[in-house]
Image: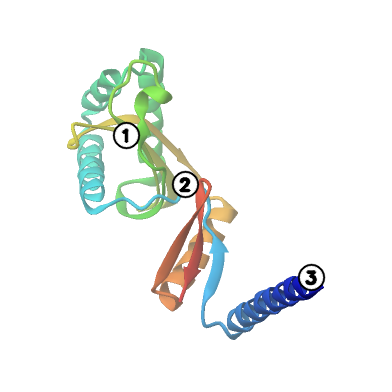
């Protein structure tokens, strides 16, 4: 009897603690002192070295486009085992986009996938695979750019794929939300949660 009573008291105490913590979290959330959420997919943060390598690769890409050196872009795609049809389609996309939007003026990082083996997705392709998304502002408007890369031997970056599209409503809303969070909650705790993570920002 005493044992049962002790167990019941323990469960009751645990329940009260859980309820108390829940109420504290609710009050703090309502007060705006911190933000709790689950990260979206493709939310990998490039480290300093990755960021420099990819930024340099994009700068090289821009220089090639502006100077009409499309053969060099096509060569990189070929080195990453992309077939001739894909190479030509990609070059056409790049040219059409340049004609439509004009010269790019700035870019804003949006998303990246965690690095994985390129051979997981592309047969006979070596290196670490990265997919990076940007909002790019150009002379005639803003658009969404996706660059796929392989990074070999930690410093050899080659273009694997390229796509452009009009900015979607959800992307614009997400960007505004993230700007708000960054401005109001500069500190962050991340707790792994499957392929994503729980964000506690304060």
Quick check: 155 left or right of 187? left
Q: CA distance from mark 2 to mark 3?
A: 49 Å
Quadrant for residue 190, please give it: bottom left
Give how far across and how far down residue 153 sits, in percent: 18, 31
Vertical position of residue 124 compared to residue 63: above or below: above
In this rendering, position of residue 201 left or right of residue 154:
right
Kindly identify which residue carries mark 1. Answer: 149
On screen, residue 175 versus residue 19, left or right, reads left
Mark 3 or 1 closer to N-term? Answer: 3
CB of mark 2 within 8 Å of CB of mark 1?
Answer: no
Q: Is residue 72 above or below residue 64?
A: above
Q: Which mark is residue 4?
A: 3
**119 to 37, vertically: above or below:** above
Please state which of residues 138 and 53 is positioned toward the viewer in this rendering. 53
Q: Residues within 10 Å of mark 3 (few under 14, many from 20)?
A: few
* Residue in the picture at 41% in, 31% down: 93
Residue 182 sits in quarter: bottom left
Q: Residue at x 26, y 36 (%)?
A: 65
Q: Earlier in the sequence, mark 2 or mark 1?
A: 2
> Residue 145 falls in which quadrant of the image?
top left
x, y percent for residue 193: 53, 52
Question: Residue 187 versus residue 102: which sits nearer the camera?
Answer: 187
Residue carrying label 2: 42
- Give the spatial CA distance, label 3 vs label 1: 62 Å
Secondary structure under tag 1 reads strand
Compute the Cα span from label 2 to label 1: 15 Å
Quarter occupied by the C terminus = bottom left
Image location of residue 79, percent across then percent down: 25, 19
Q: In the image, which is nearer the foreground, mark 2 or mark 3?
A: 3
Q: Is residue 49 visible?
A: yes
């Amino acid at each position: 009897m005493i044992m049962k009573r002790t167990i019941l008291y323990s469960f009751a105490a645990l329940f009260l603690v859980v309820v108390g913590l829940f109420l504290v979290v609710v009050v703090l959330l309502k007060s705006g002192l911190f933000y709790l959420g689950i990260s979206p997919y493709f939310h990998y943060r490039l480290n300093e070295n990755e960021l420099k390598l990819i930024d340099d690769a994009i700068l090289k890409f821009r220089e090639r486009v502006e100077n009409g050196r499309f053969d060099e872009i096509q060569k990189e795609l070929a080195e990453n085992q992309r077939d001739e049809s894909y190479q030509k389609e990609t070059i056409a996309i790049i040219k059409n986009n340049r004609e439509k939007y004009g010269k790019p003026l700035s870019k804003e990082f949006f998303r990246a996938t965690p690095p994985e083996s390129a051979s997981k997705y592309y047969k006979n392709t070596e290196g670490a695979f990265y997919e990076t998304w940007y909002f790019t502002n150009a002379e005639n408007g803003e658009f969404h750019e996706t660059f796929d890369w392989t990074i070999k031997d930690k410093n050899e970056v080659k273009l694997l794929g390229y796509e452009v599209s009009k900015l979607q409503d959800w992307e614009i809303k997400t960007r505004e939300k993230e700007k708000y969070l960054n401005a109001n909650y500069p500190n962050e705790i991340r707790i792994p949660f499957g392929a994503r993570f729980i964000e506690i920002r304060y």
